[in-house]
Image (cartoon, helix red, strand yellow):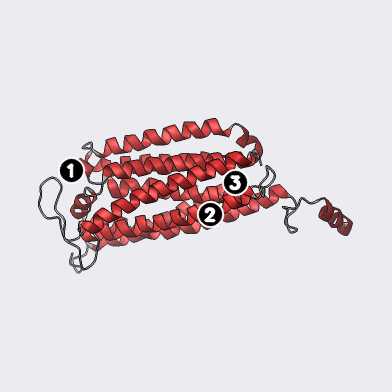
Amino acid sequence: MADAHAHAAAHDAPPELRHHFVDLPAQREASSLGMWLFLVTEVLFFGGMFTAYTVYRSTFRRAFEGASNLLDIRLGTVNTAVLLMSSLTMALAVWASSQGKKKLIILFLLATIGLGSVFLGIKFVEYKEKFERHEVPGPHFVVPHDEKTGEALPRQSEMFFTLYFCMTGLHAVHMVIGVGLLTWLIVKARKNEFSPRYYTPVDNVGLYWHFVDIIWIFLFPLLYLLGRHTL
Amino acid sequence: MSHNGSHAHAPKAYFVVFAALMFFTALTVWAAFQHLGVWNTPVALAIAVTKALLVALIFMHLKDSPKLTVLVVVSSILWLAFLIVITVSDYVTRAWLPIYPR
């Protein structure tokens, strides 16, 4: 009887269904859970840096506040808005794929890529300025001066910029990977591989993109805003 | 799972959440310039947690996800807390003993 059931299921099964799942909802739940588990490992990956940040910031408070004020708050705020908007278009792309609206899927994915690219472009401008001002940690680092008092900051401001480049750099790498994944989704969408019944890749890349957004939601106040009240 | 049903009316909720996220971004920038003493950092973190919750619950559909997924997310925050609390408890208490120069 079990054989007969399996036989019938194999014939009625939609092409998207892998044989080891009972039905499509079970397959969708399993792949979604797998994606969330991956994101848990990412939380701890970034978590190490957030821990290092917590320790050094509490140890070298003045250096961190002074160095933070040297970041461009306008570019940081604009970039936050750009990234939040890209999360909106990503959520809309997932919605469009659940409704089977092929043109809208591609449109929203393109918008997400566009906004992600704007974010990376602004980040490039910020990095370039840091290189020109010798605020990049390493042999060419020059201890910067306080924005308000003009006095030289403590030497440990270099540690702030080390963490700034590691954290925003790792975040930017995730963005570049995300743009690659979105491009892959557009190729698949153009080949009509998604339907309201099956759009798991869009769903999971969406989870990834929103996760990267959440990381930035924490990076922005921790890196750009921690010393503004001293100005 | 109410996956398809919840997506049907979704766009409106997404725009509302996006507006809220932009509001909180403006709020956190404004708050950073206020002299709140020791409260500057807690306020900034509280706003960031609120924004992250909005993204996770609505954009990432955590609100409509199975309980197992919610458990996975909560456990990730628990382990992150272990990482930070245990490390910081080491650094904070080092100064209590005179044998470690600072």
| Kind of residue at disc 3 | Lys
Front: mark 1 or 2: 2
| Kind of residue at disc 1 | Thr
Q: Quadrant of the C terminus of chain A?
A: top left
**Is residue A134 depicted above or below B63 in this figure?**
below
Chain letter of disc 2 in the image: A
Q: Quadrant of the N terminus of chain A?
A: bottom right
Q: Position of residue B79 (x, y in %)?
A: 45, 57
Front: mark 3 or 2: 2
Asked if marks 1 and 2 fall on the same chain, the answer is yes
Q: Quadrant of residue B62?
A: top right
Chain letter of disc 3 in the image: B
Q: Position of residue A116 (x, y in %)?
A: 44, 48
Viewer-nearest residue: B54 or B25: B25
In this figure, which residue is indicated by the disc labeled 3?
Answer: B67
User: Which residue: 68% across, 52% down?
Assistant: A27
User: Which residue: 42% across, 40% down?
Assistant: B51
| Kind of residue at disc 2 | Leu
